[in-house]
Each structure stands twice: as C-alpha cells, then as structure tokens.
C-alpha cells in the first residue's frame, strides 16, 4: 500500500468531530455538536462510500461496531431512542451516525439534520467526553 492509498478522514468529518479512537474497523469520532451525544463511525477503508460495497467481513464487523457503539451510548446517556444512520449526502466517505436522543431534546421527534440546532461544547468538554467514550468502548 502506498501513502496515497492510506486511509484519510474526510476534511469535514475531521473539522466537525473529536477523535475517540480506532476500533477494529472504524475510527470512532464524537460530534462537536453538544446538542446530542453523537458518535460517528468511519470504516477505515480507502474509497468506502456505501455499506453494501464493503467486503462481507467488513459489513459484519461494521454491524458489530455499530452495536458496540449503540450499547455504549445507551449505557452512558439513557436515551429514549438511538438514531443510527448512514446518510452521506454532504460527506461521501462512508460514516455511520449513532445519536442518543431524548424526548426533551431540541429537535424531538424530528431528525437532527437540518434542525438548525447546534451548540459547541465548553472548552475541554468534548475532549473529556471523547476520553470517557474511548474507555467505554474499550480503547
């Protein structure tokens, strides 16, 4: 593999998130939007765009990591509902959102995307939460 073939995170994902760590397949990221506890899983596969185009073993591993992230989010935040989605309209790089939703959140019951709600974490808060989630994920 050449350096040109190495996995790189899409610039928008890099700008909008804090690194949590690397699972077997995915890089786990925390969204910088503090309105919702929000993990993003990015399979570290060059050129990955769609789940169904991943190798079968990677599809199975991705589902296992989505399940792991969902369990961590459920235990940490006791959401009323977990939203799991691979949308990718703005960022073509395959990534899966795992968002803990509460009935009292700003966008409930609608989707978070396009809701207009955004709030930054206080200084150091996102990094501290990312470290906590890394421990919860066993990283």
Image (cartoon, rainbow, N blue to C red):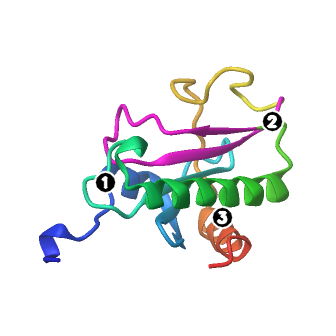
Label 3, on which residue?
125
Whole-Å distance between the Cαs marked 1 and 2? 29 Å
Label 1, on which residue?
10
Image depth: mark 2 or mark 3 in front: 2
Please provide percent x and percent y for residue 44.
38, 64
Whole-Å distance between the Cαs marked 3 and 1? 23 Å
Please provide percent x and percent y for residue 75.
84, 58
- Mark sitting earlier along the chain (3/1): 1
Q: Is residue 84 magenta?
A: yes
Instruction: Look at the picture and state if 32 lies above or below 137.
Output: above
Label 2, on which residue?
102
- Mark sitting earlier along the chain (1/2): 1
Which quadrant of the figure has residue 100?
Answer: top right
Whole-Å distance between the Cαs marked 2 and 3? 20 Å
Secondary structure of the residue carrying tag 2 is loop
Please provide percent x and percent y for residue 16.
44, 51
Q: Is residue 76 visible?
A: yes
What is the crowding at mark 3: few (fewer than 14 residues within 10 Å), some, or many (at least 20)?
few
Residue at 35% across / 34% down in the picture?
90
Q: Is residue 23 magenta?
A: no
Please provide percent x and percent y for residue 104.
83, 30
Secondary structure of the residue carrying tag 3 is helix
Q: Is residue 31 visible?
A: no
Instruction: Look at the picture and state if 110 lies above or below 135.
Output: above
View extreme (front): residue: 56
Bounds of the magenta segment: 82-103
What is the crowding at mark 2: few (fewer than 14 residues within 10 Å), some, or many (at least 20)?
some
Residue at 30% across / 54% down in the picture?
11
Whether the residues at callouts 3 and 1 have beta carbons within 8 Å, the answer is: no
């Amino acid at each position: 593999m050449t350096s040109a073939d190495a996995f790189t995170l899409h610039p928008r994902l890099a700008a909008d998130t804090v690194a949590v760590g690397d699972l077997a397949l995915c890089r786990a990221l925390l969204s910088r939007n503090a309105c919702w506890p929000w993990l993003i899983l990015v399979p570290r596969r060059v050129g990955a765009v769609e789940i169904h185009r991943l190798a079968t073993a990677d599809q199975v591993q991705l589902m296992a990591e989505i399940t792991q992230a969902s369990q961590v989010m459920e235990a940490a935040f006791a959401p009323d509902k977990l939203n799991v989605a691979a949308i990718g309209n703005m960022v073509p790089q395959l990534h899966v959102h795992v968002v803990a939703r509460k009935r009292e959140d700003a966008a409930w019951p609608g989707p978070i995307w396009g809701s207009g709600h955004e709030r930054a974490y206080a200084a150091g808060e996102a990094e501290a939460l990312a470290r906590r989630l890394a421990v919860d994920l066993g990283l």
